[in-house]
Image (cartoon, rainbow, N blue to C red):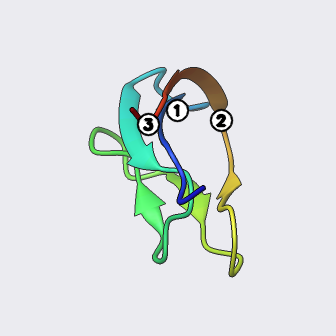
Amino acid sequence: MAGSFITVECPDCENEQSLFEKAASEVSCAVCGHTIARPTGGKADIEGEVTAVVEAR
């Protein structure tokens, strides 16, 4: 399976942001700039609560 999009809540400002679970670059919060995902070569290291997963169809 290729991967899914997820919605993550920022631990600092509680903003929800959608991103790819296998992010190839750092993903920062659009509101406060906190890094919410770091690439690891596979699934990204998520720093926040995953609130939703969009399943592939």
Residue hosting label 3: 56
Disc number for residue 10: 1
Q: CA distance from mark 1 to mark 2?
A: 5 Å
Give, as a three-letter code, the residue at label 3: Ala
Residue hosting label 2: 48
* Quarter holding residue 39: bottom right
Quadrant containing the N terminus is bottom right
SS at badge 3: loop
> Which residue is rendered at x = 48% and y = 76% of the image?
24
Task: Residue 38 in the image: state x and y as whole percent.
Answer: 61, 67
Residues marked 2 and 3 touching at CB (< 8 Å): no
> Which residue is rendered at x = 52% and y = 32% of the image?
10
Give, as a three-letter code, the residue at label 1: Cys
- Earlier in the chain: of badge 1 and badge 3, it is 1
The vertical placement of 43 against 24, above or below, is above
Q: CA distance from mark 1 to mark 3?
A: 24 Å
- Earlier in the chain: of badge 2 and badge 3, it is 2
In this orientation, which residue lies closer to the viewer: 50 or 29? 50
The vertical placement of 13 against 35, above or below, is above
The vertical placement of 51 against 1, above or below, is above
